[in-house]
Image (cartoon, rainbow, N blue to C red):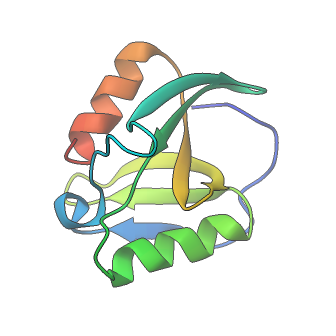
């Protein structure tokens, strides 16, 4: 996956319970949302409305810049570009890749 040129400058964040961490949303913004960004395709995702340590760890990491996310149990790696108003922005290579990421993260 190669979108954007900012290097990942901190440790990867583990996602151990994606089904509790992420949630689709219809208002005020419908997610997941696939869009064209400056560096390629971006997938915008929302988090669970409940206080969740895993979601907090992800948001804290991406607020410092691009971050690598490792989704368990398959140890699949995703590139998070940042956060936007509390939403996670991921780099994806195609529409098919976006669908794979959505399934991986329980959407």
- Give the residue at x 37% y 60%: 47
Q: Note whether 105 is above or below 43 in the view shown.
A: below
Image quadrant of residue 85? bottom right
> In what quadrant of the picture does the N terminus appear?
top right
Q: How many marks?
A: 0
> Residue 67, relative to residue 98: is it above or below?
below
Residues 78 and 33: in front is 33
Image quarter where the C terminus lies is top left
The answer to which of 62 and 30 lies nearer the viewer is 30
Judged from this view, the residue extending furthest toward the top is 95
Judge whether 44 appears above or below 96 on screen. below
**87 lies left or right of 19:** right
Up the image or down, 64 lies above or below 91; here it is: below
* Residue 100: x %, y % from top left: 29, 29
Taking the spot 76% from the left edge, 35% from the top edge, the residue there is 4
In-image side of 29 versus 105 (left or right): right
x, y percent for residue 3 = 69, 31
Determine the residue positioned at 19% across, 47% down.
Answer: 106
Q: Which of the pair 43/29 is nearer the observer?
A: 29
**Residue 57 point in image, percent of width and height:** 48, 78
Left or right: 104 in relation to 63: left
**Residue 28 spot, x, y in % from top left:** 44, 46
Q: Which residue does the image show at 34% across and 36% down from the upper left?
A: 101
């Amino acid at each position: 996956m190669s979108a954007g040129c900012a290097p990942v400058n901190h440790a990867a964040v583990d996602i151990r319970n994606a089904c509790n961490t992420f949630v689709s949303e219809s208002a005020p913004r419908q997610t997941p949302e696939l869009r064209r960004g400056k560096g390629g395709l971006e997938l915008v995702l929302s988090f669970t409305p409940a206080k969740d340590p895993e979601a907090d760890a992800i948001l804290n990491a991406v607020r410092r810049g691009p971050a690598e996310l490792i989704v368990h149990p398959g140890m699949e790696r995703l590139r998070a570009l940042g956060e936007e108003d509390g939403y996670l922005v991921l780099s994806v290579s195609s529409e098919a890749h976006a669908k794979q990421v959505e399934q991986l993260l329980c959407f």
